[in-house]
Amino acid sequence: MPPFSQPDFSMKRKLKVFKFGGASVQDAAGVKNVADILQTYKNDPLVIVVSAMGKTTNALERIVAAHAYHTGEAYLLLENVKQGHYAIMEELLGKNDPAYDDVNDHFVAIEWVLETEPHPNYDFMYDQIVSVGELVSTRIVAAYLNKSGLAAQWLDARDVIRTDDIYREGWVQWDETIENARRLAQPMLEKGGFVVTQGFIGSTKENFTTTLGREGSDYTAAIFSFCLEAESMTIWKDVPGVLTADPRIFENVAKLDRLSYREAIEMTYYGAKVIHPKTIKPLQNKSIPLFVKSFLNPEAEGTFIGPDVDDLYPPMVAVEKNQALLNIATRDFSFVAEHHMSFIFNKIAEYRLQVNLMQNTAISFAVCINNVDDRVHKFAQSIEKDFKVMIDNEGLELTTVRHYTPQTLEMLRQGKIILVEERTRNTVQMVMKVVPELKRKS
Ligand code: ADP
Ligand code: ASP
Ligand code: MG
């Protein structure tokens, strides 16, 4: 493969942004490994974005549900999360470290929420509780880096990332965020030492905590990279780089050494879980290269993601599970015309649904949508006066193949019923129903 042309870096763009996800800091050994990796970058200006430890976000989600539905388990679940963190802290920091006070303060914020009646806005309450995962993980990581001789300053990402007030899926208000990043992070970097901050979280202009959507820490790192004009961004994963398909689903996957922003955004939008789909745009807009590297083998080269080149790619597969296929038909047999489309798409936007595929016939229209919470049903209800809506959401997956070959498609179809298929020169998309007794082969 020919090399990508590298962007022209000016001398001031020396900042690097690193992102360490939940898997990299799931236990004390993980945090020690992160500190070992960072020793190599001791003298570099570095913003380090860290996610919640291991599966903490899922655990916090269960606390939110327990409180909202009065199951009586919320305090017990919280206690488990606390004990898990204290055990890691003890191994890393001993019994007396100022970080305990900070971590306790964040957990107390959850207790306050639990002491009052569940907030009528579930998503608002969710963000107040779930954000604590990143707040405590960064307290612990920053304290351990300082203890290891790596100067680290803790930055509250909520003071930087300004979002709208759509809880659980805040949209970034860029002007304020850029201003905040420069005002707060720049002086910290100039002082020297690393800046450690949280992935996934932000705040509204009224200072209420928001989150950016599950798995949003990659996106946070891209936001910081954009605002501070980083030289490069690196996400450290438990895989060697971007692979041709998800290794949890397929065998015989291969690492891609280089990938264009275009390929990366196409694959991640349709479910390649290795990078959050919103990550690529801010990087592409400022020609900031993205490296995907393994925290288990930090010396290895990983994947480089950069500007487009004329290149040959092997077949690449992304699978998005949990899909809903909606068949939307006019009630009076009129053709599906532009004004219907515009009405339906306005509603889709209102419910913040992601359309992955669509197809229309004379009087009906099929859309494949990510089946999130009860939003698909709420959307269907909102248009049912004018349209008959049929929803199929049982065991549906969307498989997207870039640079397909007949053999790849044949392999993917095994054990599946294909409900909708669409094909362009580079891409095939198939909405499939999983037949459980037939196992997928690679
Ligand atoms: P993080 O710890 O940063 O949250 P994730 O678990 O979200 O990391 O993402 C890494 C996982 O993404 C890998 O373990 C792998 O199973 C999955 N994955 C899905 N598609 C791909 C792909 N195309 N290449 C590499 N990994 C992939
Ligand atoms: N902790 C959040 C999540 O698990 C964000 C992230 O890890 O990227 O979704
Ligand atoms: Mg993740």
Image (cartoon, rainbow, N blue to C red):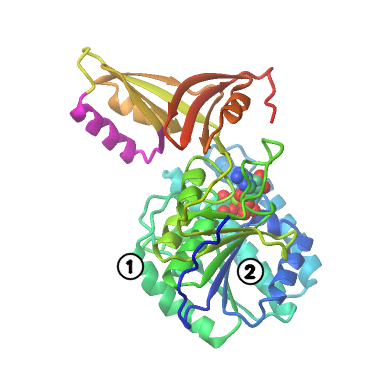
Relative side of 242 to 353, left or right: right
User: On the image, which quarter does residue 226 sit in?
Assistant: bottom left
Q: Which residue is mark 2?
A: 139
Spot occupied by residue 269 in the image (x, y as percentages of width and height): 47, 44
Residue under the image location 54 percent in, 87 percent down: 191
**Which residue corresponds to the image point at 63% horizontal and 21% vertical from the top-left?**
414
The amino acid marked with disc number 1 is Asp
Residue 121 belongs to magenta span: no
Q: Which is more toward the observer, 243 or 24? A: 243
- Left or right for 354, reference 383: right
* Label 1, ligand 2: CB separation under 8 Å: no
Seen from this angle, which residue lies furthest front?
Answer: 2
In the foreground, 418 or 35: 418
Task: Estimate the x, y position of residue 125 in percent, counting from the top left.
Answer: 48, 49
Q: Secondary structure at mark 2?
A: helix
User: Which residue is found at the position 39% from the left and 38% from the top?
Assistant: 353
Magenta-drawn stretch contains 346: yes
Q: Which residues are magenta?
A: 337-356
What residue does disc 1 label?
175
The residue most toward the top is 333
Q: Is residue 59 visible?
A: no
Q: Quadrant of residue 145?
A: bottom right
Placement of the N terminus among the 4 image quadrants: bottom right
Task: Judge the density around disc 1: few (<14), some (14-19), many (≥20) Cα neighbours within 10 Å.
Answer: few
Is 363 situated above or below 242? above
- The amino acid sitting under disc 2 is Arg
Q: CA distance from mark 2 to mark 1?
A: 28 Å
Crowding around mark 2 (Cα neighbors within 10 Å: few <14, some 14 to 19, many 20+) is: many
- Numbered disc in front, either 2 or 1: 1
The answer to the question of whether label 2 and label 1 lie on touching residues, with beta carbons closer than 8 A, is no
